[in-house]
Amino acid sequence: MRDVVPGELVVGYRRGVDRRRRADVRRRAGVRLKRTPAVPGVELVRLGPGRSPAAAGRSLERRSEVAYVEPNRFVEAATMPNDPRFGSLWGLHNDGRPGRRDADVDAPEAWRITRGSPRVTVAVVDTGIASGHPDLARNIWTNPGETGLGAERNGLDDDDNGYVDDSRGWDWTDDGNDPRDVLWHGSHVAGIVGARGNNGRGVAGLSWHGRLMALKVLGDRGRGFTVDVAAGFAYAGRMGARVVNASLTSDHRSQVVVDAVRSHPRTLFVVAAGNGSDGTGADNTGAPKWPCAITAPKPDLHRRLRPVGPARPLLQLRALVGRPRRAGATRGQHGSRPQRPP
């Protein structure tokens, strides 16, 4: 299986390089513009006929206008548990069936304080969301700049954000405004984050009344590209999401994703770590690949901790069993973010 998209490169320009100079850089490097992600100073380019990625990359890197060049890599949906009892949500409230009583996040205790607010939007950057699902429908985010008086389907970019009729999010896999979920990975994640609670059906998410922003960057087979993940992150930050959840994985660090995160310091970005099928995960190494993934000890349903890898994070989260404690900083880590949605 290929790791990179053939014939494509991601180019990050230095601050102040205008369109005319970028066009000159592309012409001299023998590449053409494919599209411009919603990340400042970044372009996705396509190699010309017979042009090798290595030669084009060297040509681009020699230019003073260019800050970095990297492949457009594939990303994948993080591994889903295959335990048939996973849907029982013992992690929210465990009565001892299965495992040990109170081996959970104390969700009912938290719900005495708050059950979520429609003023808080969580962007789910994933395979989309099944917006018609009865446990999710009432919590789906809508874009106020593209909603009402027929704005949802008028063929115009009413809010001038670069996306036409994005009333319910965006689908980068099809370059369209219908981020519906076929694989159900994103819908599962959305349910954990914010399925409607106390409605007499299905399950309850951690936030009963928060808004879920559907941003589809993974196709119907669970694969996507780093440049689309970055675009999704940038969209979420620009459109006011307080939290971004990305339950996906990649074996390589991407500068364009780092740039998207850094461009929105008021948004909490959460990327799953430790979801690998071997119990360690692809990102829990001495050099984490995501700028906002934090390694956390993984408790089982008996509250026993399982180590998830050799990384030494800035903030080690003792999930389910105690308070956070400081630890040594991980080389290459750029933020302190929890592994799971709040």
Image (cartoon, grey):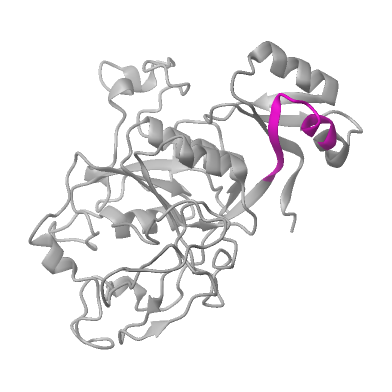
| Quarter of image, res 83 | bottom left
Is residue 66 shown in magenta? yes
Q: Quadrant of the C terminus?
A: bottom left
Percent position (x, y) of residue 241? 33, 39
Between 205 and 287, the one lying in front of the other is 287
Q: How many marks?
A: 0
Q: Look at the image and tell me whether residue 184 can be seen.
A: no
| Quarter of image, res 199 | bottom left
Picture residue at 36% right of the left edge, 18% below the top: 159
In screen coordinates, is 85 left or right of 199? right
Percent position (x, y) of residue 66? 71, 29
Q: Which residue of the protein is positioned furthest toward the top in this rendering?
A: 20
Q: Look at the image and tell me whether residue 51 can be seen.
A: yes
Picture residue at 48% right of the left edge, 21% below the top: 162
Between 104 and 143, the one lying in front of the other is 104
Picture residue at 58% right of the left edge, 56% below the top: 289
Q: Is residue 304 above or below residue 129?
A: below
Percent position (x, y) of residue 208? 19, 53
Q: Which segment is the magenta one?
A: 58-72
